[in-house]
Image (cartoon, rainbow, N blue to C red):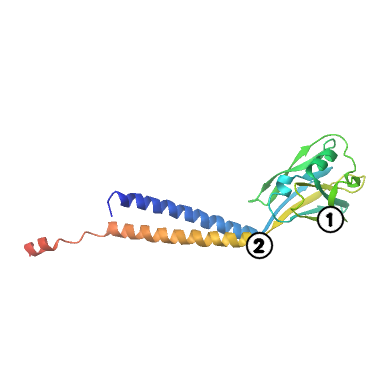
């Protein structure tokens, strides 16, 4: 092999090894975070009053059913509803409410931002909802992806404001865990091959050159 080609090949193998290591680490992290069931879960707690909206960029972010669980610390009534984004916006735009603004996969947490001002109407009485769920202290709604884009709204279900709420968003797909394991295996294989090649190259450079037989015979 040409002396010019070898350094380039060694550098390329080194880069491949680093990429394989990154794939191994990311795959391991996702496998541990999602678990065998492939569950992605995000939670947020808020003492603020008013409704909470989960817009389509999150509700319809992944092509699997979207689960929302709302739990009130005071045991009061909870109501959940899913509607077309336009219809939900018309109901909420004039009233003070919160909107899910971000998800952190590393922390498993969601963040909220304030929106609107003024009194919020009783959204539970509108006829725009595709699916609803209600309960005392806790309610759960599973939203499919066929009717998207959808906005999911969490409200009190009565005249009193929604308070002391813990909101949990979930997506579940078993294939995510298998994909993470595949990434680990592929990344580990690349690291092993790159490491073996680089180790052989290092040993080849470290070994002393073989003595010239003709010169040895003349001196002998």
Task: Point out residue 140 in the picture as x, y percentages from the top left corner.
Answer: 81, 56
The vertical placement of 140 against 220, above or below, is: above
Q: Which residue matches tag 2?
A: 174
Which residue, as the protein is rendered here, is positioned at the far front?
A: 146
Q: Which one is in front in this view, the residue at disc 1 or the one at disc 2?
A: 2
Task: Point out residue 40 in the picture as x, y percentages from the top left corner.
Answer: 68, 56
Quarter of the N terminus within the rendering: bottom left
Q: CA distance from mark 1 to mark 2?
A: 26 Å
Asked if residue 111 lies left or right of residue 179, the reply is right
Determine the residue positioned at 37% across, 57% down: 198
User: How many numbered markers are drawn?
Assistant: 2
Q: Residues within 10 Å of mark 2 (few under 14, many from 20)?
A: few
Residues 202 and 58: in front is 58
Q: Secondary structure at mark 2?
A: helix
Q: Secondary structure at mark 1?
A: strand
Give residue 35's quadrant in the image: bottom right
Residues 38 and 138: in front is 38
In terms of sequence position, does the residue under pointer 1 or pointer 2 come before the other? 1
Determine the residue positioned at 47% across, 53% down: 19
Residues 39 and 4: in front is 4
- Residue 212 disc label: none
- Residue 138 disc label: 1
Determine the residue positioned at 61% across, 60% down: 32
The vertical placement of 38 against 43, above or below, is: below
The vertical placement of 121 against 108, above or below, is: above
Give residue 207's quadrant in the image: bottom left
């Amino acid at each position: 092999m040409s002396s010019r080609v070898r350094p380039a090949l060694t550098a390329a193998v080194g880069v491949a090894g680093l990429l394989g290591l990154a794939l191994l680490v990311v795959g391991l992290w996702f496998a541990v975070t999602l678990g065998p069931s492939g569950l992605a879960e995000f939670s947020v707690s808020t003492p603020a009053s008013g409704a909470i909206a989960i817009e389509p960029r999150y509700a319809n972010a992944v092509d699997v059913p979207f689960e929302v669980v709302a739990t009130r610390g005071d045991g009061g009534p909870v109501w959940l509803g899913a509607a077309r984004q336009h219809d939900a916006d018309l109901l909420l735009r004039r009233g003070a409410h919160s909107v899910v603004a971000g998800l952190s996969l590393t922390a498993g947490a969601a963040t909220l931002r304030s929106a609107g001002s003024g009194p919020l109407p009783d959204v539970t009485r509108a006829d725009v909802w595709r699916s609803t769920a209600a309960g005392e202290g806790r309610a759960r709604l599973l939203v499919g992806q066929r009717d998207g884009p959808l906005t999911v709204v969490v409200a009190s279900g009565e005249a009193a404001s929604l308070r002391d709420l813990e909101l949990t968003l979930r997506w579940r797909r078993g294939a995510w865990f298998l994909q993470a394991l595949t990434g680990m295996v592929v990344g580990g294989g690349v690291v092993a091959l790159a490491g073996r090649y680089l180790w052989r190259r290092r040993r080849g450079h470290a070994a002393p050159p073989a003595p010239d037989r003709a010169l040895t015979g003349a001196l002998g």
